[in-house]
Image (tube, rainbow, N blue to C red):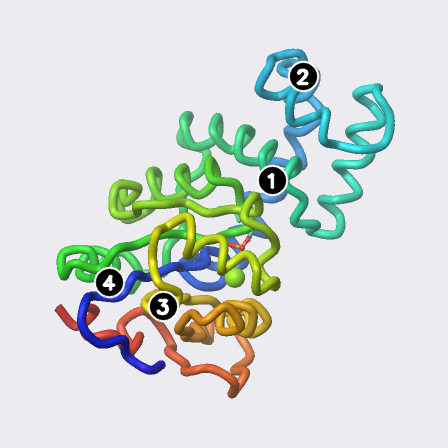
Amino acid sequence: MTRPEGAMPHVLTDIEGTTTAIAFVHRTLFPYAAEAMASFLRDHGAEPEVAAILRDVPGGKRLGDKLDTLRGWMAHDAKETPLKALQGLIWRQGYADGALRGHLWPDVAPALRAWHAGGARLAVYSSGSEEAQRLLFRHSEAGDLEGLFERFFDTRMGGKRENASYARIAEAWGAEPGRILFLSDVAEELDAARGAGLLTCQIVRAEDGTERSNRHPVARDFDEVPFAAAKG
Ligand SMILES: CSCCC(=O)C(=O)COP(=O)(O)O
Ligand SMILES: [Mg+2]
């Protein structure tokens, strides 16, 4: 990473594979939502918030048709905004009753707190919905970290492998792209961020089996992020 000069940089972080184990997302969160999807739609499908999301799910008007489409998306881990929004609403209940707690790698909460205390401005960019992101950090294993973040960007900004999404985020956040450091495990996301002028660092976690790309600066965890504020 080329360190930005002058003011403290903004830090934009991915979740899955970066702050949080891939296994937690795929073996805990996704199955929880898949299991509850049918009953959730049956019980809440007529509520305005849910009905509005369902209108954006293609495949017919019947609830059963919508469910088929959603199941197809879930089977392929499709990052479709309506699916992500519904998953967030379903996880809300799980976090509220204690069935779910947001996993964070042990280095993440201390680093985020240190960066924040050092004056860095923090935001999240994940395919999980804004609601899902807030829940994970509010109910994290390391306590309530939601307040550390200024913004929670999701797929409404566009896909994570598209340059334009990062330009939109910089604009919405009111930050120069060259002052934003994006942290992610996925090289294609970092390529897109760099294409929009952001600084990048690949988080290569051995526990997640992340493959190093050689196209971006690398850190094995948040303690290694080459960012002076991280060192406190
Ligand atoms: C906000 S936790 C759920 C993560 C999620 O739904 C997902 O699809 C993972 O996306 P990410 O962009 O964090 O890799
Ligand atoms: Mg990721």
Number of the front mark, 3 or 4: 3
Q: Secondary structure at mark 4?
A: helix
**Image quadrant containing the N terminus:** bottom left
> Hey, what amino acid is under mark 4?
Ala
The residue to which callout 3 is attached is 181
> Hey, what amino acid is under mark 1?
Lys
Number of the front mark, 2 or 3: 3
The residue to which callout 4 is attached is 111
**Image quadrant containing the C terminus:** bottom left
User: From this viewpoint, is residue 192 visible?
Assistant: yes
Q: Secondary structure at mark 3?
A: strand
Q: Residues within 10 Å of mark 1 (few under 14, many from 20)?
A: many
Ligand 2 is within 8 Å of the C-beta of the residue at disc 3? no
The residue to which callout 1 is attached is 84
Whichever of callouts 2 and 4 sits on the residue coming sooner in the sequence is 2
Measure the alpha-carbon separation of dots 1 and 3.
25 Å
**Residue 160 appears at what percent x and percent y?**
57, 59
**Residue 155 appears at what percent x and percent y?**
57, 47
Whichever of callouts 2 and 3 sits on the residue coming sooner in the sequence is 2
Q: How many marks?
A: 4
The residue to which callout 2 is attached is 45
Q: Residues within 10 Å of mark 4 (few under 14, many from 20)?
A: many
> Hey, what amino acid is under mark 2?
Gly
Whichever of callouts 2 and 1 sits on the residue coming sooner in the sequence is 2
Q: Is residue 43 left or right of residue 73?
A: left
Q: Secondary structure at mark 2?
A: loop
Whichever of callouts 4 and 1 sits on the residue coming sooner in the sequence is 1
User: From this viewpoint, is residue 209 visible?
Assistant: no
Q: Secondary structure at mark 1?
A: helix
- Nearest to the observer: residue 162 or residue 39: 162
Q: Residues within 10 Å of mark 2 (few under 14, many from 20)?
A: some
